[in-house]
Each structure stands twice: as C-alpha cells, then as structure tokens.
Amino acid sequence: MRIALFITCINDSFYPGTGRAVVTVLERLGHTVEFPQEQTCCGQMHFNTGYRPEALPLVNRFARTFAPYDAVVTPSASCAGMVRENHLTVAEQHGSPALGRQIAELAPKVHEFTEFLTDVLDVTDVGARFPYRVTYHPTCHSLRGLRLGDRPQQLLRAVRGLELVDLPAADSCCGFGGTFAVKNADTSAAMLADKTAGVRSTGAEVLCAADNSCLMHIGGGLSRQGAGVRTMHLAEILAATEGDPR
C-alpha cells in the first residue's frame, strides 16, 4: 500500500512534530510513508468563510498531488472532513466533471490518523508508552463530522502506563471553530472558559486531541490560567516509547 502524509497547513507551520509522529508510528508498524512536496492547503478556510470559487485551485492541487496514492493519512479530523465532505461540492459547483470524478475516487482514500490505524490497519496497540494522566477532547469535526466515536480512546487505552480520564462535557465545542474565534471572540472565550474548567477538573497532566487547531486554542487558555496542563496531539503520544517525547 502506497501511503502519503497530508500534514496540513497548521501542522506544517506550527506543529511539525505531529507529522513526524505520524510517520514514526506508521514506520514502527512496518509501513513506508511518502511526503509529496507539492501539497498545500486543503481550502477549508476559504470554503467556510464563503470564498468557495477561490478554494477551487487548492482542490485541484490536492487531487493532482495525492491521486497516485492508495491512502492519504492526515493528523487532522478537520482537514480530513473538508476533503471528504466538501471537495466534491467545490468541484461540482466551480470545477469540471473530470475533477468531480477524480475527487469522488480520491476522497474515500483520505483518512484521519486514528481511523486509519483502527479501521484500515486494524491496530489499536502501536507499541507506545506514556506514563502520564491524560484526558481527551473530541473535536467537533472528529465527533460530528467524521464520527470517530471511541477510536482515539481505544488507541490511548492501549498505551502502556497511560491513565486515561474522562473529560466532563467532552462533546461541547472548545470555541475555536477557525474564523469563529476571531469573528465571535466573546462567545468563543466563554466556550473556552467552560472547556478549560472541565480539563482542569480532571487532574490530567496532558490534554490531547486529533486536531492541533483546537489544542492551540485550549492550550492558550490553559497557559494564561497557569493550569500546568500540557497539550499534545494524540499522534505524539502514540509515537512515544519512553515516556514524554519532548
């Protein structure tokens, strides 16, 4: 199986260690991962803010870049959801029938990292060790869009030494929502306050999720509160074998 890593903009720019963690885990499981240099943004920001025709070149590039692969793996439920749910809409409304056919064939091959491990590779124990108290935040796209269910928790429960604690009101939004946090700052801040209170109530040392965008938002709130709770992408925990990789 020919596997490509779609790292996404935010990970490439701010959290490159997450992409490296994905490769570490997949290589540990015996797979080779390629990184197409031509990849760029999936167009989600354009699509969600109403600039759908402007997203077309990015959809075109994505389809062209990842067409040769059997599987495209990304450490972002948000971007995986954009490709699987909205690329075809952009292609049909602003592109061509040929692009639509290409997207229809490619989109099912795009997998969020945890669902690729559990559903495609049929693996839950990836040989990780992380002896810390951890809580998991199911981001909106992972919970409501991709419907990951308890796949991330299955993987976390198999990590040696990890104590997984439930997050109160886990299914509530953290208030990030991409441009929502900018356009509706007061509402976003109120939602963030509820989320950080829930995180702190668990006594967890680490908060993890399947989207670094939400972790950036929550982590900022926790840092300003002096909570002492670190945020880590789930892939980084699964890549750890001797405790904290950082």
Image (tube, rainbow, N blue to C red):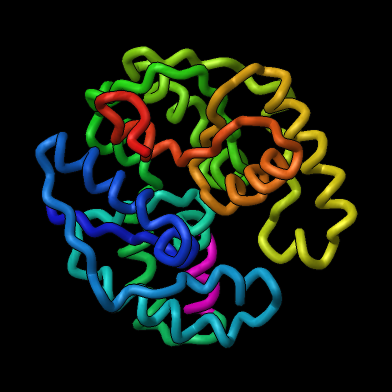
**Left or right of residue 82: residue 21:** left
Magenta region, main secondary structure: helix
| Quarter where residue 173 is shown | top right
Is 72 placed above or below 13 here?
above
Q: Residue at x 63, y 30 (%)?
A: 228
Number of marks in the rendered image: 0
**Left or right of residue 13: residue 22:** left
Is 115 placed above or below 183 here?
above
Q: Is residue 79 magenta?
A: no
Q: Residue at x 49, y 49 (%)?
A: 77
Q: Position of residue 53 (x, y in %)?
A: 58, 86
Is 226 placed above or below 123 here?
below
Q: Position of residue 121 (x, y in %)?
A: 23, 35
Q: Residue furthest right?
A: 186
Name the foreground residue: 225 vs 85: 225
Name the foreground residue: 54 vs 227: 227
Q: Residue at x 10, y 38 (%)?
A: 30
Q: Position of residue 82 (x, y in %)?
A: 52, 61
Q: Residue at x 46, y 23 (%)?
A: 153
Name the foreground residue: 178 vs 203: 203
Q: Is residue 86 magenta?
A: yes
The C terminus is located in which quarter?
top left
Is 160 placed above or below 92 here?
above
Q: Which residues are magenta?
A: 85-92
Q: Position of residue 244 (x, y in %)?
A: 37, 30
